[in-house]
Amino acid sequence: MPILRGIVAAERPFEIIYRGLLVTEDGTVIAPGYGAFDRLRARLREAMPFASPRQSNLGHISLGRILDPVGCEAFSALKALVADARDMMHGALPVREIKCVHERRWYMEDREIIATFPLGALAHDGGRGAQA
């Protein structure tokens, strides 16, 4: 875990702004998140090539999932709702730490937190690195 700790320690804390709605191909309704976290995600993915390819490349919060066909009328109404909500603000989340999580079942139904790493440890200690 020292590699992950170093990657996270080199990044400053940030905020994720949640705005709009999207419906993914598998029927998941999400609130997309926007913020300065693309570089951190790319570096973590590079360091963990074994990570689940099922994870979205989009920072988001899953709000629900459509499991059964809803019909043309309901689907049209859902598309209209998504379009109307494009600029709707849902709030912001300050991110001060990153957790390494092992999911035993998809969608966090059964999971274990392996480690927690604070963001910005290198920035706050003069570049010496976080103490283990």
Image: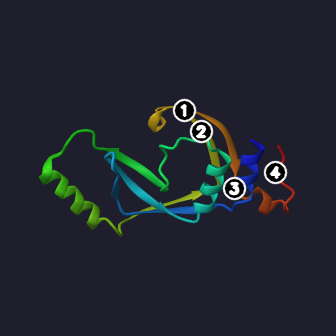
**Element on which disc 4 rests:** loop
Residue at left offset 35%, top offset 59%: 21
Residue at left offset 21%, top offset 63%: 80
Q: Which residue is mark 3?
A: 119
How far apart are the alpha carbons under marks 4 and 3?
10 Å
Residue at left offset 74%, top offset 59%: 10
How far apart are the alpha carbons under marks 2 and 4?
20 Å
Q: Which residue is mark 2?
A: 101
Quadrant where the C terminus lies? top right
State which tag comes first along the sequence, 1 or 2: 2
State which tag comes first along the sequence, 1 or 4: 1
How far apart are the alpha carbons under marks 2 and 3?
16 Å
Q: Are marks 1 and 4 in contact (CB under 8 Å)?
A: no
State left or right for residue 60 relative to residue 39.
left
Q: Amino acid at mark 3?
A: Leu
> Among all residues in the image, which is located at the extreme left?
73
Q: Are marks 2 and 4 in contact (CB under 8 Å)?
A: no
**Element on which disc 2 rests:** strand
Which of the numbered marks, if any, corresponds to residue 11? none
Q: In terms of depth relative to the viewer, which is nearer, 127 or 95?
A: 127
- x and y, in percent, of residue 12 in the image: 69, 62
* Neighbour tally class for label 1: few under 14, some 14-19, many 20 plus, Cα within 10 Å: few
* Residue 1, quarter of the rendered image: top right
Residue at left offset 79%, top offset 59%: 122
Q: Which residue is mark 1?
A: 111
Q: Which residue is mark 4?
A: 130
Q: Are marks 1 and 2 in contact (CB under 8 Å)?
A: yes
State which tag comes first along the sequence, 2 or 3: 2
Q: Nearer the viewer, mark 2 or mark 3?
A: 2
* Neighbour tally class for label 2: few under 14, some 14-19, many 20 plus, Cα within 10 Å: few
How far apart are the alpha carbons under marks 1 and 4?
26 Å
